[in-house]
Image (cartoon, rainbow, N blue to C red):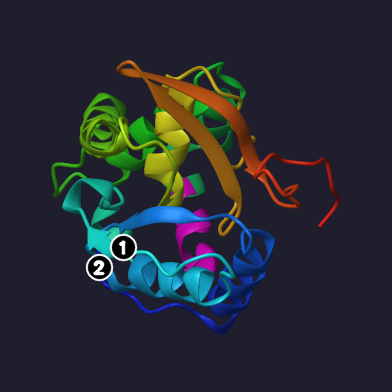
Amino acid sequence: MTNSPLTKKGIRMAKRLGQELKQIKFEAVYTSDLKRTQKTAQYIIDENEAYYPPVYQDPDLREISFGKFEEAKNTKMIPKALKALGLRRILQALLNEEHVAELTELFRSLDGNEVIEDADHLTLRMTRALTNIGNQYQDKGGNILIVTHGLILSNFIESLEGEVPLFLLDNSRASRVDYENGKFKVIYVNRMKLDDKGMAKDAIS
């Protein structure tokens, strides 16, 4: 995955999420090794009123590579995907119970020149990263902020049988996954508007 910078919209959304999370104390922050997750984390933590935690990078939190479509805008990628895959195949993937895994497989088939990770490998990589982090902080307790990317996070949530929106998780939205005794549990997905305990409240944003 290439190291593209945050857009103005991305900065605005990160600051908005930072405001939603401003009263939550994070013991640490982990991002991928790509600059845009590091900058997103910085904007979020800059809004925090509780504590400025240490920030670490983990390459296992990196997004899947999109091959020759890397950095392509939707206006360019969508027509090519429709032509290469066909609308029916794309709709079938979206309507599948495990639609994130199906979409990942479609991305893999778009570029025949590069070996792209499958959904199982994405899950393995994300699970490895979060297990290592969870084991490190389990005895201490507290909250850890993970700033990663849309497809790999959506794939991980789906692997835990969490409900992922049709078009994947939105950027700069909060999802909460608890870790205890080596097990992950999805508490909520893709939310904003948290109460003072960090729990999600239903809201239109």
Per the image, the residue denoted by label 2 is 2
The picture quadrant where one finds residue 184 is top left
At label 1, which amino acid type do we have?
Glu
**Residue 167 colored in magenta in the image:** no
> Compared to 140, does 13 lie above or below?
below
The picture quadrant where one finds residue 2 is bottom left
- The picture places residue 38, in percent across and down from the top left corner, at 34, 70
How many numbered markers are drawn? 2
State which tag comes first along the sequence, 2 or 1: 2
At label 2, which amino acid type do we have?
Thr
What residue is shown at x 19% (from left), y 44% (from top)? 112
> Compared to 130, does 19 lie above or below?
below
As helix, strand or loop, the secondary structure at mark 1 comes to: loop
Q: Bounds of the magenta span?
A: 73-81
User: Left or right: where does residue 38 sit relative to residue 44?
Assistant: left
Between residues 2 and 47, which one lies in front from this camera angle?
47
Per the image, the residue denoted by label 1 is 70
What residue is shown at x 56% (from left), y 84% (from top)? 8
- The picture places residue 46, in percent across and down from the top left corner, at 51, 77
Viewer-side label of 2, 1:
2
> Dot 1: few (<14), some (14–19), or many (≥20) neighbours within 10 Å?
few
Contact between marks 2 and 1 (CB within 8 A): the answer is yes
- The picture places residue 85, in percent across and down from the top left corner, at 44, 38
Q: Quadrant of the N terminus?
A: bottom left
What residue is shown at x 18% (from left), y 53% (from top)? 59
